[in-house]
Image (cartoon, grey):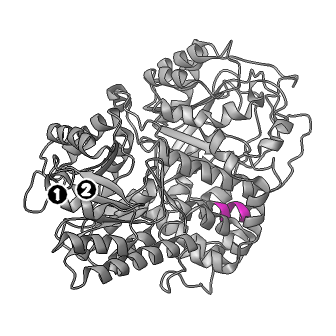
Amino acid sequence: MDKLILGGCEFSSRLFLGTGKFSSNALMGEAIAASGTEMVTVAMKRIELSDKEDDMLGHIKGENVRLLPNTSGVRDAEEAVFAAQMAREAFGTNWLKLEIHPDPRYLLPDSTETLKATEKLAAMGFIVLPYCQADPVLCKRLEEAGAAAVMPLGAPIGSNQGLRTKDFLRIIIEQSGVPVVVDAGIGAPSHAAEAMELGASACLVNTAIAVAGNPVEMAKAFKAAVEAGRMAYEAGLGSRTEGFTAEASSPLTAFLD
Amino acid sequence: MFSEEIKKYSWDETTERIYSKTGDDVRRALSKEKCDTDDFMAMISPAAVPYLETMARLSRKYTQERFGNVMSMFIPLYLTNSCTNSCVYCGFHVSNKMKRTILTPEEMVNEYKAIKKLAPFENLLIVTGENPVLAGVPYLAKALDLAKPYFSNLKIEVMPLAAEEYAELRKHGMNGVICFQETYNAANYNIYHPRGKKADFQWRVDGFDRMGQAGVHSIGMGVLIGLEKEWRTDVTMMARHLRYLQKHYWKTKYSVNFPRMRPAENGGFEPNVIMSDRELAQLTFAMRIFDHDVDISYSTRESARFRDNMARLGVTTMSAESKTDPGGYYSYPQALEQFHVNDERTAVEVAAALRKEGIEPVWKDWDSVFDALDTGSTGKGTAA
């Protein structure tokens, strides 16, 4: 499997994990370890920034695990920039998952504010990974604004509905000059495999693991699914059985005879 | 810049890969919704020959879905045959003893008026040899200014320019640029282009990046078939170049050309390869299946019969009644031409033939008001 290059760093695992919704921090820590992930996002709002011994962070720290603070909770670009600066100070990292969802029901990303914030934060030296709509033009604009990757959604956060935006993800992957990480909506390992088969660079999964009957086993299942999907993509998928059939007569090319 | 990108690809290895493609590779490509350059290689390979009819059907289907039953019509106007280059295959070769002409502003206007009498052409392609001193950017700007009242869409096919020069010409109404790389084989490029500014491979191949950076709306590419024996390798390199440009300059519309070398007054250069109609058809189908959206342009280099038959099968842009000599429509209707055309029908005859095939010739599909509105917003280059 090819390594993923993102923000100038190499990743062997193409599975990113979110850290919300676990029944305990200890269980979360086990799931992270089982998943083999090297990138874990954590909501700044969940962390006691002044507490160096924060329990949640304590369970994330692993040798190969990069911490990706996210701005979940902010409602516009201005708040996002402020939160990002706090995150940089608190976690000592330039990496940032930019999330701006002013809508508290579906947590859908605000495209206009996300683009504005990406521009500002990239100029400030952040490695910005914006969570965004599966909008191909927006993704190109984010890339031009300096995003290190784009993170289009498969379906609303936490919905477990799978790749409802598949047709647009396909265009985004085709056009993108930066890694495409499918974020949100991935509810089952098969969804993750499907995203990887499409050519996504990575998947970000949270709810589907955190609320599974056995989160640790589910984390292993996602690890396998992401690897299988990526291997299939790199190997080149075979042809479908439908499609074309040979024609007995050749009226269209007869003029070439 | 693509001159860096192209270093990733070995010419010989690409050739080997094309010839190692199998029927399975072709079937896989034909059943895909979106093909990559590997699929393109399969479709242009000898292994795809038995699938020609299937490819024709797919090509027709995708062309109809995306473009409908129409053909965009354009006409070229050569402003000068003065050229400082020495391309061994070209009639404008610097040491060719021929009468050289550079149209005056008055002559340009006469040509514009004469073209409008042929057919309702709105897409004009302004062509020059490479003479930056006598027919450089200010000269082209003048030609564009004078053409604007007559044509709604102006493109140029001239020597590669600097990004600022493309941007400058955009202000004069230039909407598109066509430039043929001729060949992507850097090792042999100078055999065909030994002297003059055109001898600089890198300057030419990076010209497309500069067009993209300048926000040119429409970019046309081409490989001159007849130079490299392995034309399949050459067009594969072009397909890679196309994908590269699409990713970097994503607001630009692209067109491709596969000009087959024609006889010219050129001191007897013989093509290194002759591409048959069957092969050109296969290549055209492959390009359409590879890219559903790219414009595929056929010029009057191709025969009337071949053009009429291919009009439904992938081609989306055609020239008609072209003269390849400067001032050929009015001022100098005698031979000072770059090459001899093949389809010698009038534009009215070509249009009638297309209608007979169920295709509507479209003369106008752009308006210069969009150029005037342009704020210079571009798909600026992003590091991929």
Circle 1 residue: A108
Q: Give the spatial CA distance, label 2 vs label 1.
A: 8 Å
Image quadrant in which you'd find residue A158: bottom left
The magenta segment: B278-283
Circle 2 residue: A133
Secondary structure type for disc 2? loop
**Is residue B284 covered in magenta?**
no
Instruction: Tell me the quarter of the image containing the N terminus of chain B.
Output: top right
Q: Position of residue B58 (x, y in %)?
A: 53, 71
Residue B323 seen in the current view: no
Q: Position of residue B20 (x, y in %)?
A: 75, 71
Q: Position of residue A104 (x, y in %)?
A: 7, 58
Q: Is the Cβ of the residue at disc 2 closer than 8 Å to that at disc 1?
A: yes
Pick out the residue farthest to the left: A104
Secondary structure type for disc 1? loop
Tag 1: Cα neighbours inside 10 Å, few (<14), some, or many (≥20)? many
Main SS class of the magenta portion in the image: helix
Q: Nearer the viewer, residue B310 or A223?
A: A223
Tag 2: Cα neighbours inside 10 Å, few (<14), some, or many (≥20)? many
Chain of residue at mark 1: A
Q: Nearer the viewer, residue A68 or B34?
A: A68
Chain of residue at mark 2: A
